[in-house]
Amino acid sequence: SCQNKHRARERRQQAQVEPQNLVGAQAIVGMGEEFPSSLSSCKFSCRTPLDEKAILLVQFLLRKNNLRESITKEDMIKHVIKKHKKHFTEILRKASELMVLAFGIEVKEVNPTTHCYALVSKFQRTSDGRLRGEEIMPKTGLLMTILCVIFMKGNCATEEDVWEVLNVMGIYAGRKHFIHGDPKKLITQDLVQERYLEYRQVPNSDPPRYEFLWGPRAHAETSKMKVLEFLANIHDTVPSAFPSWYEEALRDEEERARARFAAMLRTSALANVHSGGSGRHSFSHLQ
């Protein structure tokens, strides 16, 4: 079952991931202080006043960007951070991590003299890399975060696992979100209908419990390595900083390469049959 698989997976990961890599792994729970296998121990009560300020700062940054207004350190302190001014760097760091996790956007200082900032996509670059308000695609970062949780949980994550992470990011089932609207509908219906996620009942669960897997469209449009790169980028490290997941991602890349090559062979063979050729020169471009 999913639960047994991901418990075994967690035990292997706890044994393999070096202590210095825990900081990177913490990114998946936003501002949580626990390793992903201990998500259940980090409830909403874990959040500190600085965490709350970081969430407010995310909302402030998105509003400023949507209005095409400049984003300055002075404004952030004046309107959001206020008495926590001495913790500006830490609050901005937390907010930046949430922006990447939720929206796939990073906060960049574009003018160190005036302390002006801009929102920059980690996925789609424009000529100057900056984002206009309408270009922000909220589902991108949220989906990547969920796919990351599923991967880290042994390719199958319970609904509780997913909501534990989203709760730390300030996203709750049954509570309208200022960006995502109805989060539960988004992840259990919209993303499922779009085939990015698979949402199914845990076998033999009574009362019924549910779990998430990657959907066929997620497998087609991204990969375990890309999801691991997403996690690594959040903390300016590399995928190999997470050994067990990196090894699995490498195996996945190899399997994908073999599948692509096999598909290419089939396509070339069919084309050769239809053209009536002998096939001797079908793969000359590979030599």
Image (tube, rainbow, N blue to C red):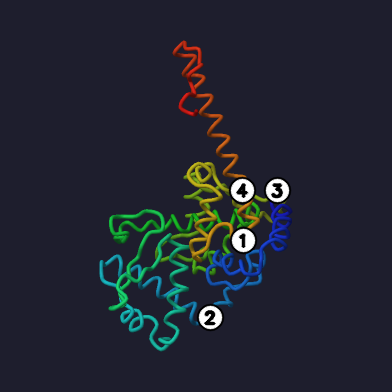
Name the residue tied to disc 3: 203
Q: CA distance from mark 3 to mark 4?
A: 9 Å
Q: Earlier in the sequence, mark 3 or mark 2?
A: 2
Q: CA distance from mark 1 to mark 2?
A: 21 Å
- The residue depicted at 56 percent of the width and 50 percent of the height is 224
- In the image, which is nearer the foreground, mark 4 or mark 2? 2
The circle on residue 161 is 1
Q: In the picture provided, is 118 more to the left or to the right than 265?
A: left
Question: Which three-letter amino acid code belongs to the residue tagged 4?
Answer: Arg
Q: CA distance from mark 3 to mark 1?
A: 17 Å
Q: Earlier in the sequence, mark 4 or mark 2?
A: 2
- The residue depicted at 43 percent of the width and 59 percent of the height is 104
- The residue depicted at 71 percent of the width and 52 percent of the height is 5
* Circle 1 SS class: helix
- For label 1, the crowd category at 10 Å Cα-Cα, with few meaning under 14, some 14 to 19 and many 20 or more, is many
Name the residue tied to disc 4: 200
| Residue 226 placement (x, y as % from top left) | 51, 51
| Residue 85 drawn above or below residue 2 | below
Q: Are marks 1 and 4 in contact (CB under 8 Å)?
A: no
| Residue 59 placement (x, y as % from top left) | 38, 71
- In the image, which is nearer the foreground, mark 3 or mark 2? 2
Question: Which three-letter amino acid code belongs to the residue tagged 1?
Answer: Asp
- In the image, which is nearer the foreground, mark 3 or mark 1? 1
- In the image, which is nearer the foreground, mark 1 or mark 4? 1
Name the residue tied to disc 2: 48
Q: Earlier in the sequence, mark 3 or mark 1?
A: 1
